[in-house]
Amino acid sequence: MFYIILRVKNMQKCIIDAQKSMNVISTNTKGIRVDEINLDKRIKQYSKGHYLVVNYSLEYLQKKALVLEGVLNKTLKKFFKDKDLRKILVIGLGNPNVLGDTFGIKVTNKMIATNQYNFLTIPKVILFNPNVVNNTGINSFDLIKALVNKEKPSMIIIIDSLCSKNAKVLNQAIEINDCGIIPSANLSINKNISYETFKIPLIFIGVPLLWKVKKNYYTDYNILEVLETTSEILAKSLMKAIM
C-alpha cells in the first residue's frame, strides 16, 4: 500500500475508536460490521452521544457497492427515526483545494436540492458547502449560523472527511453520530456545531480519508477513486433515507 503525505492544517477530528471501556454492540450484515456505541459521558477526545460506525473492506466499494448502500441506508434510517424531515439542511464541510478534505463537498454535489420546489410534497433539501476560512475569510460557523437563521431547517446533516490514527480503517469506515463537530477544530474562531448550538436535531457523517502520524497526514494513493465511489454511495443512501 502506498501513501501520499499531505500538508493539512487544522484537521477537525478523528474517527471514534471503539475501546474496551465503551459499550459497543456489533452486528454483521453480509460481511459489513456495524458498531453501535453510546457514550454516557465524555471519553478523552470523544463527545457524549450516539455513534454508529459502518466497517467494510475495499471490495464493497469496488464490487459490492449496492450491498454497502443498502446497509448504510438502513443505518441512516435508524438515525432519522422520529426526526422531522420536512426541511433538511445538508452541509458539506471541507477545503476544495485539498483532495483528502473534499468528501463532504463531493457528497452534497451528488445530491439533489428540492427546497426550491414549493409545489412538491417531498422533504425540502438544502445543500450548502461553506468552504474554509482560509479561502473565504469567513469562518464556517458564521456562514452556517446565518443560513440556519434564514431557512430554519427541521434537521441538519453535516458531512466531512475524518482522520484516523489506525491505517487499517482508512477508506473503510463511515461514522454517523448525533454529537456534532467543530469545523477546523484547531482554529479558535470556529465553534462547535451540535444540537445545543441551534436546538435543531443534527447528524454528523464522516469517512476517515487521512491517516494521522505524529504531525503529518497521509492519504492513500487511490484516494480519488475512493472519494468518488464512497461519496456516490453516501449521496444515494442519504436521498433514499430522506425521501
Image (cartoon, rainbow, N blue to C red):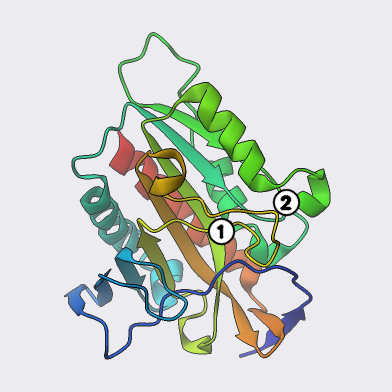
Q: Which amino acid, mark 2?
A: Val
> Is 222 situated left or right of 242 in this image?
right
Which residue appears at 26% of the width and 57% of the height? Answer: 75
Tell me if residue 231 comes above or below residue 161 in the rendering.
above
Which quarter of the picture shows residue 123?
top left
The quadrant of the picture occupied by the C terminus is top left
Tell me if residue 243 comes above or below residue 18 in the rendering.
above
Tell me if residue 134 comes above or below residue 171 in the rendering.
above
Q: Residues within 10 Å of mark 1 (few under 14, many from 20)?
A: some
Which quarter of the picture shows residue 201?
top left
Tag 2 residue: 132
Q: Which label sits on residue 182?
A: 1
Q: Residues within 10 Å of mark 2 (few under 14, many from 20)?
A: some
Measure the alpha-carbon separation of dots 2 and 1. 12 Å
> Is 235 situated left or right of 220 in this image?
left
Q: Which amino acid, mark 1?
A: Ile
The numbered mark, 2 or 1, whose residue comes first in the sequence reads 2
